[in-house]
Amino acid sequence: MSDQSTTSTRVEQPADDVGSGDPAVGTHTVDAETDEQLDESWVEYEFEDDAAISVSDLDVYYGDDHAIDDISMEIPEKSVTALIGPSGCGKSTFLRCLNRMNDRIDSARVEGTVEVGDENIYEGDTDLVQLRKRVGMVFQSPNPFPKSVRDNIAYGPRKHGDLNTGLLGRLLGNDDQQREDELVERCLRQSALWEEVSDRLDDNALGLSGGQQQRLCIARCLAVDPDVILMDEPASALDPVATAKIEDLIEELAEEYTVVVVTHNMQQAARISDQTAVFLTGGQLVEYDQTDKIFENPESDRVEDYVTGKFG
Ligand SMILES: Nc1ncnc2c1ncn2[C@@H]1O[C@H](COP(=O)(O)OP(=O)(O)OP(=O)(O)O)[C@@H](O)[C@H]1O
Ligand SMILES: [Mg+2]
């Protein structure tokens, strides 16, 4: 960590910088409410555990639009990290950088480094299939396959051959079907869904409720044995009861997995996360710290306004 006493205060958008009058020129900080000066120390969150993910100097462009502006942050393992901020500030874009989902967007250009464990995932020879097994993703709308509950979970391991270790298992009397049954049950239990669907394993997953579908998507993600689970507003389409189940589940998952969750729900971020990163307009990370600190005593006036609901 750099010596904070020498940390300079960055003035992100001095008046001279925007002298062209072109709103596309400049450093994309201003949300029209303030020209608050950012301080690098506000994002220097220190923690004792190992980092699961290290992001350095990350920029993302969609064509000429600068969506993520020079973000560096480390995400501690086996904990919940919340990403919050107003619509359009780049939360989903940032999340997608963590398993290279932005590769699927033609206009997206990513610069900088993202290390998952010890691997820089933007280096040329990264195996994207393996990466997305290690860093799974759950989206806002549940998107189970139009297949049975069982097949939703077993599909990935079958495809990757993880269940197909046949001979030794069969010699030990533990055949692939048994392994699959065990996997399906384990993942459904881990995602707090087993009690509700254990007698419906062969029914089509699209017949489940929205909240059950979302937990099934989490179970599907767990089935390929990830280290990190990315969630983009995983409960925003759900009712309060289903939301509470997802929140409980996220906290439980963080005992074994690293969870990074985008949410617009301040109470949810405050309830479930260990640390919170606040993005503001222009794709900047403005403050990153323990969740209590962010919600009770943030450094940035804009973050204070945002978390207390004055804007956003
Ligand atoms: N596929 C895309 N092509 C072009 N521009 C995009 C694309 N996806 C996002 N953007 C732009 O990048 C910026 C950040 O978008 P992003 O979806 O990451 O924001 P967000 O913080 O997730 O917003 P929300 O809270 O509404 O989901 C926005 O200006 C958006 O218009
Ligand atoms: Mg989003």
Image: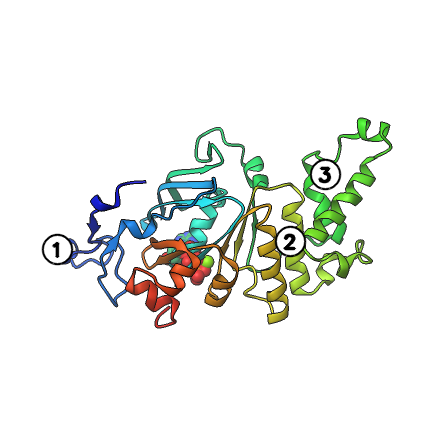
Q: Pointer 3: what residue?
A: 158
Instruction: Identify which amino acid the numbered label 3 is placed on.
Output: Arg
Q: What's under tag 2, amino acid-wise? A: Cys
- Amino acid type, callout 1: Asp
Q: Estimate the spatial distance between the alpha carbons at disc 2 and disc 3, rounded to whole Å.
A: 16 Å
Q: Is residue 294 left or right of residue 235?
A: left
Please state if 289 lies on the left or on the right of 163 as rendered. left
Q: Which residue is mark 1?
A: 16
> Are the residues flagged by discs 1 and 3 in contact, CB closer than 8 Å?
no
Separation (CA) of disc 1 from disc 2:
49 Å
Identify which residue is drawn at 71% across, 44% down: 155
Identify the residue at horizontal 34%, vertical 59% (top origin): 280
29, 64: nearer the viewer: 29
Quadrant in the picture for the C terminus: bottom left
Tell me what residue is drawn at x 67 percent, y 59 percent.
213
Q: Quadrant of residue 171?
A: top right
In this rendering, position of residue 203 left or right of residue 85 = right
